[in-house]
Image: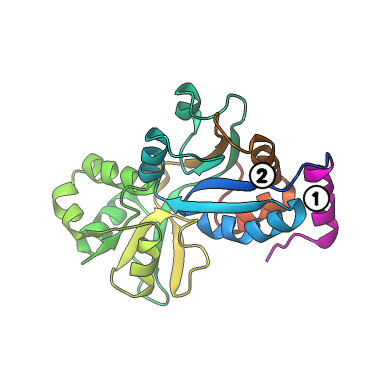
């Protein structure tokens, strides 16, 4: 497992706080798909910067609703592009960073029979034969899976079998063996006990989801927020995101 070394932590601390800025409380909206990685990085950032993170996790539509309603935040991390938020004036121009990307794949209960997802036809048969399937629902991958079922012409048969819920629900459905499998991005299920990742859906059907972050244009702690964004692009942080299922964007 990748860890941030003490030497690296010291270097980052100097980089972040070299100007002697006072410690701040940074309010973060973070997509649930990045929760595992962000929770691992939070104590490292707090230790090296002296700042405190106050994080709300949720599916992108819920977080966008909070932003649209004017709820205060300093940094937002989404499993979609923050570009539209920049155009709306909600996120500061030139603050956008890219954290990585994930495709859509299949996760099963640990040790369960593996559905055949080797070809488009095999994947369709597996979807039709399953008794219950989990997705992220209103999450980025869940919305794509919903549109994909329409595209494959099997929405009427498969959508009634889908189980989804709040952020993190899909992984728990799989771990508790309440579904045959989940069709989802890798980050929400990576490392979850009782869940086994079997691979990506066929390339012809694949859609890559890019995770991005940005600084609120009305941030109460803009300097601290910028420090957090800088930290998230350091090699140790990138390594954690990769470990949790996000690969670098080509």
Lateral position of residue 181 relative to residue 8, left or right: left
Picture disc at residue 119? none
Identified at 36% across, 42% down, the residue is 61
The percent position of residue 54, horizontal first and vertical second, equals 56, 53
- Please tell me which residue lies in front, 138 or 204: 138
Q: Quadrant of residue 20?
A: top right
Residue wearing tag 1: 13
Residue 9 within the segment the image draws in magenta: yes
Q: Secondary structure at mark 2?
A: helix
Identified at 26% across, 53% down, the residue is 124
- Please tell me which residue lies in front, 44 or 209: 44
The percent position of residue 85, horizontal first and vertical second, equals 46, 29
Q: Residue furthest bottom?
A: 111
Q: Main secondary structure of the magenta part?
A: helix
Where are the magenta residues, as a range?
Answer: 1-18
Q: Quadrant of residue 93?
A: top right
Give whichever of discs 2 and 1 has the lower sequence position. Answer: 1
Whether pointer 2 and pointer 1 mark residues with C-beta atoms closer than 8 Å, the reply is no
Lateral position of residue 231 relative to residue 183, left or right: right
Instruction: Specify the quadrant that holds the C terminus.
Output: top right
The percent position of residue 175, horizontal first and vertical second, equals 39, 73
Q: Label 2 crowding class (10 Å Cα cut-off): few <14, some 14-19, many 20+?
A: many
Identified at 41% across, 77% down, the residue is 111
Picture disc at residue 228? 2
Q: Secondary structure at mark 1?
A: helix
- Please tell me which residue lies in front, 77 or 101: 77
Q: Label 1 crowding class (10 Å Cα cut-off): few <14, some 14-19, many 20+?
A: many
């Amino acid at each position: 497992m990748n860890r941030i070394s003490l030497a690296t932590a010291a270097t980052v601390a100097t980089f972040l706080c070299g100007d002697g800025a006072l410690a701040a409380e940074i309010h973060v909206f973070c997509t649930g798909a990045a929760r595992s990685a962000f929770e691992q990085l939070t104590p490292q950032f707090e230790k090296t910067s002296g700042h405190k993170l106050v994080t709300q996790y949720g599916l992108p539509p819920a977080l966008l609703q909070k932003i649209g309603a004017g709820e205060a935040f300093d940094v937002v991390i989404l499993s979609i592009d923050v570009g539209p938020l920049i155009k709306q004036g909600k996120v500061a121009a030139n603050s956008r960073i890219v954290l990585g990307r994930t495709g859509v794949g299949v996760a099963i209960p640990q040790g369960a029979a593996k559905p055949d997802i080797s070809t488009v036809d095999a994947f369709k048969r597996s979807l039709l034969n399953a008794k219950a399937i989990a997705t992220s629902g209103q999450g980025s991958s869940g919305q794509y899976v919903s549109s994909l079922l329409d595209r494959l012409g099997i929405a009427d048969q498969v959508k009634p079998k889908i189980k989804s819920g709040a952020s993190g629900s899909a992984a728990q459905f799989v771990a508790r063996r309440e579904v045959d499998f989940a069709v989802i991005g890798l980050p929400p299920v990576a490392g979850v006990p009782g869940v086994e990742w079997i691979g990506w859906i066929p390339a012809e059907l694949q859609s890559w989801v890019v995770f991005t972050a940005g600084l609120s244009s009305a941030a109460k702690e803009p300097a601290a927020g910028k420090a957090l964004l800088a930290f998230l692009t350091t090699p140790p942080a990138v390594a954690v995101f990769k470990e949790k299922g996000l690969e670098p964007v080509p």
